[in-house]
Image (cartoon, rainbow, N blue to C red):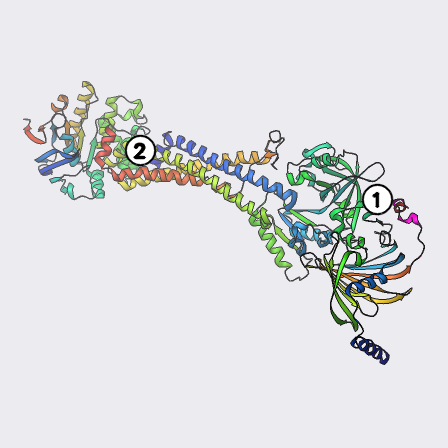
Amino acid sequence: MIKFLIKGLWRDKSRSRLPVIVVAIGVMLTVFLHAYITGFMGDTIEMNASFSHGHIRVMTRAYAENIEQMANDLALIEVNTLLSDLNERYPELTWSPRIRFGGLIDVPDEYGDTRSQGPAMGLGLDFLSGSSKEVERLNIENSLVRGRLIRHQGEALISELFSQKLKIVPGDQVTIIGSCMNGSMIFYNVQISGTVSFGAEAFDRGAILVDIEDARLALDMGDAASELLGFLKTGFFDKEKILKIAEGFNRSVVADEDEYRPVMKGLSEQGSMGQYVVLAEVWSVYISMVFVFAMALVLWNAGLLGGLRRYGEFGVRLAMGEEKKHVYLSLIYEAIFIGIAGTVTGTAFGLLFSWLLQTYGIDISGMMEGSSIMFPSSIRARITPATYYLGFIPGLLSTIAGAMLAGIGIYKRKTSQLFKELEA
Amino acid sequence: MENSSIIQINRLVKSFPAGKGEFTALKGIDLQFKAGEFAGLVGPSGSGKTTLLNIVGSLDTPTKGEAIVLGKSISHLSAREAAHLRKHELGFIFQTYNLLAVHTVYENVEFPLLLLKLSFAQRKKMVMDALEWVGLTDKLNSKPPKLSGGECQRVAVARAMVKKPSLVLADEPTANLDAANSHNILKTMETLNRELNTTFLFATHDEKVIAYLKRKVHLKDGNVDQDEWVKQ
Amino acid sequence: MKKIIVLFLTIAGIGLCGFSTPDANEILKKIDDNLSSDNQIMEAKMIIHGRRTSRTITSRIYAVGNQKSFTEYLSPPREQGTKMLKLENQLWVYSPSTDRVIQISGHMLRQSVMGSDLSYEDMMEDRKLTDTYNAQLIGLDTLDGREIYLIELEAKVPDVAYHGQKIWVDTERFVPLKQELYARGGRLLKQVLLHDVIRVDGRWFPTKMIYKDMLKEGDGTEFHIIDIQFDVDIPEYIFTRAALRR
């Protein structure tokens, strides 16, 4: 009997291949859309991670308590030891030491007197060691407006808007005035190698980027760093994984009363970014659910029509003495079979397209020119565990629900009525 | 069994809701059929013949009165018992053949046997026998859309006969067939009636069918108008 | 020991016997007489007790009146050669590593000097107390075994760093032994303890001061005067911007 049903299912294209294709397309769209939304929302998160939060951030406890003050007197020291320890303990993460500092940029005139001056947000990161991915991570090369990247010690990049305000061009020398780790006022000369524009208001208003070794020299922070940003090697923030790492690390140092002991904070534990992560999660779930619901309606309807179309066949089978329950169950089994086949196919294709978009991305930097919002320069999808199972909701459940609803007719209608539909 | 009553109908009434009131299709019919009969319900459209055939086939239930088929009261059968009756004892032949289009001739005929959970060897023999009765052993692997109307109806007859049921119910079996094919199929059924002693009950207004009947029960407006036995 | 007690009793006795209590503004003037001079050269050591480390910075300071001062940092190596010039209400800093002379102005004046508990503003402010504050005597007390007047100061000019002060003044030497500096809202911003009062050229002068920025963590900054000379000739070229680069 099962063989008979499978033969029927296999041979009747409108009963098998077509519904499988419909389900597969629906599931594929659902899977792809989910990966796309997750990717786009995720990229905004990644951007903030790259610039300031990391996927995870290591700071001293005291620094973390006043994080917005960028207080380098509370910075991490003996960073190299800490780094090798972190690298050993967390092979899934790469670490980037950063120095954040506030200060003034002072531009001299020909006599060395102050010609112009403005408050700056400084960022020291690894440009020159050759082993870091910071330039790539911050997409600095693509953000260059004038000049070139930092190639030597003593060079700096400055935000384009800021350079216009200070009336400086690449090649000019400026003095950074700030305070060092001990609180002393420091003066440090750098040569502007280029200007950058990141499309982020806060950053473009007054940022200066220097190599971390320059920042260390200037701020008397040898073997120190404001913070260590950790990034998952997968390139994507994974909330659960990161929180587990942070919790584990913090538990291991909790006995240490020293306010300068390092603490780890995941991206989602850091102020407004935490709220954004929650918001992004809620939205991606919300949008995905709306789409899942819409696809569910379509597939449910397809299942329903597929069932209704076969009332004649059911009539014959009932006349032959097949029980209603048996007919009904065979309809459900068929729906399960179609649902699974369609969902697996659709998920596979959805994952394939998502993977392509995740790996290669679509460059939208051209479209974003002149935009004042900090958008990722390319659209990328993002495959998460949910991408693998989300398609089953419309693909399997809706198809079955449609078949179940259609099948109710078998019970509701009198057998002789099924015949009338059969004869018609 | 030959002279025992296979169908016993007592004061059978069947009404359907129609608009605000109801329409009474059968108005208190009394009838009896014996095993081995080759009988027909004859009458124009709306006379109640299909309604009566459906009740006898346990596809519908009486509103009032009683229909006892093979000793079982149709009114008192559960859905499951009705299915059991159809599965084991009844065969149906429809005006539109109602073959499963994606299945081969062999598979269509085999279907009722699958429900009886017979072994492959048993099924094969019975299917081949049935196809031989209707002369279609050369079309085993054809599918219905490739067959002519006459061939389709012969497949339908084979399907109805394959399990050797006690009773075959045929509703306008020749309505879509030409004269030659109609005679052909009726001859086959007549032979099967004679050789297997299967009871045939037709619902028809086709003269070609009527000519073959050994008993003609004329229905008119839900009543038995005339119960006519053909002299052998 | 006996001598000290006798001295103390004598002083106390004089006070009790109706030795007239001076007017608060008079006390202020006497403080100014002690601490202000036409010119002075001072060598000082600053020990900054930060949250994590302590550092010592030495400097030489030349001052003329309360309008001009020039500071040169002598150690540690990182600070060596850094110079500061104050002319009236302007402040320039020279940093040898950048070879830049930069004027410190606006909110930067509130920044800490070398990470200490002193701000540039604190260093700039050397107008006489009598010129900037009205004083009121609010009590007599003892502090570390010295009789003191407790006076309360309220700014009479708008451009002072601290709106109010409380000063514990040695009744005999007219040297502040403790100072509390308040913001306009009454919030305590800084506390200064003055110790090791010595007699130099007929003046009483505290040679150790402990500054504590109350808004900053850490254990304060000690300011030791290693050597101080009053009324010496200081060449005029010291107080020029050109001298910063020399």
**Magenta-colored stretch includes residue C235:** yes
Left/right of residue C111 with respect to residue A249 in the rendered view:
right
The secondary element bearing badge 1 is classed as: strand
Residue at numbered disc 1: C101
**Residue A308 marker:** 2
Magenta residues (range): C231-242
In this rendering, the answer to whether C50 lies above or below A398 is below
In this rendering, the answer to whether B102 lies above or below A112 is above
The secondary element bearing badge 2 is classed as: helix
Kindly indicate the quadrant of the structure image that contains residue A168: top right
Query: Please, which chain is the residue tagged with disc 1 on?
Result: C
Determine contact: label 2, label 1, CB under 8 Å: no
Left/right of residue B191 with respect to residue A183 in the rendered view:
left
Q: What x and y, as percent, mark residue B10?
A: 8, 39
**Magenta-colored stretch includes residue A255:** no
Q: What x and y, as percent, mark residue A394?
A: 42, 38
Tell which of B60 and A283 is nearer to you. Answer: A283
- Which amino acid type is shown beneath numbered disc 2? Leu
- Which amino acid type is shown beneath numbered disc 1? Val
- Which image quarter is the N terminus of chain B in? top left
Left/right of residue A177 with respect to residue A345 in the rendered view:
right
Q: Nearer the viewer, mark 2 or mark 1?
A: 1
